[in-house]
Amino acid sequence: MLVTLYEGVTSIYVCMFRTNHMALIADAKPDLRLAAWLR
């Protein structure tokens, strides 16, 4: 139960993080984009 809740919250945060950062560095270098995605 706790693990499922944690995974759900984490996936939501990752989705928001990726969306925001992809928009911010859309015109940046590919390696920068990858670094932000992996962070």
Image (cartoon, helix red, strand yellow):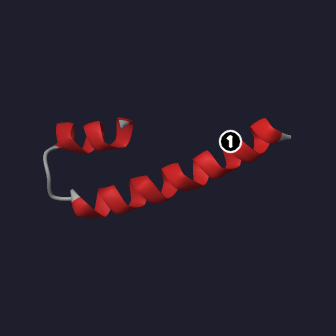
Percent x, y for residue 26? 22, 58
**Residue 31 vs residue 5: left or right?**
left
**Residue 28 vs residue 5: left or right?**
left
**Residue 27 vs residue 38: left or right?**
left
Neighbour tally class for label 1: few under 14, some 14-19, many 20 plus, Cα within 10 Å: few
Q: Quarter of the image holding residue 27?
A: bottom left
Q: Quarter of the image holding residue 39?
A: top left
Q: Which residue is mark 1?
A: 7
Report the residue at 14% width, 52% height from top. 28
Question: Above or below — where is 8 with respect to 20?
Answer: above
Question: Above or below — where is 33 with respect to 24?
Answer: above
The quadrant of the image that shows the N terminus is: top right
Percent x, y for residue 13? 53, 53
Query: Is label 1 in a helix, a strand or a loop?
Result: helix
Q: Residue furthest right?
A: 1
Type of the residue with mark 1: Glu
Give 17 or 34, whichever is nearer the viewer: 17
- Count the labels in the image: 1
Percent x, y for residue 31? 19, 36
